[in-house]
Amino acid sequence: MSGINYMTQEGYDKLQAEIDDLKTRGRQEIAKAIGEAREKGDLSENAEYDAAKDAQGMLELKISEMDKALSNARILKPSDIDTSKVMVLCKVKIKNVKTGMEVTYSLVSESEADLKAKKISVNSPIGKGLLGKKVGEIASISTPRGNMEFEIVEIGM
């Protein structure tokens, strides 16, 4: 998706809040753990210190990746969405051609994906297969279980 991360305002705000929390509370907790490990003596043989430093590196990497996602974010409003075809932020009702089972998903950015809330990433195999399709079209999607076909039943917001 050319590096652009399309998001809802809600998703953007949630990601910003998570970054702020990691930069404040997360960094404070890591600093405290490093300080406590440091007090235990020789750092060259201190596994707790090494683990705390590793955790610090992982935290900073996560913050960096989230900052990058925010810097590439483009907030889309419902008025920006063309519901004549499946696009990011659309709700799409699909029917499994083989089983007849219907399900509705919202296509969202990777950072907003939540399968329990029926929000799938546009970068997922199903998301990629649905993008650009119109009502009545069949999307043939390659999944780990094999090829699946879904009919686009309805597109909305």
Image: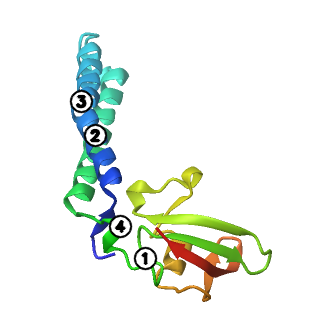
Side of 115 where 56 appears, left or right: left
Tell me if I can see residue 125 in this picture.
no
Q: Nearer the viewer, residue 120 or 157?
A: 157
Q: In front of the other: label 2 or label 1?
A: 1
SS class, disc 4: helix
Q: In front of the other: label 2 or label 4?
A: 4
Q: Residue at 42%, 67% (x, y): give it.
A: 89
Q: In front of the other: label 4 or label 3?
A: 4
**Badge 4 amino acid:** Pro
Q: Percent x, y for residue 142?
A: 62, 79
**Badge 1 amino acid:** Met
Rounded to the nearest whole Å, what is the CA distance between mark 1 and mark 4?
A: 11 Å
Rounded to the nearest whole Å, what is the CA distance between mark 2 and mark 3?
A: 15 Å
Rounded to the nearest whole Å, what is the CA distance between mark 4 and mark 3?
A: 36 Å
Rounded to the nearest whole Å, what is the CA distance between mark 1 and mark 3?
A: 37 Å
SS class, disc 2: helix
Q: Earlier in the sequence, mark 4 or mark 3?
A: 3
Side of 128 where 59 appears, left or right: left
According to the picture, the residue beneath numbered tag 3 turns out to be: 27
Residue 78, labelled with which disc?
Answer: 4
Residue 17, labelled with which disc?
Answer: 2
Rounded to the nearest whole Å, what is the CA distance between mark 2 and mark 4?
A: 22 Å
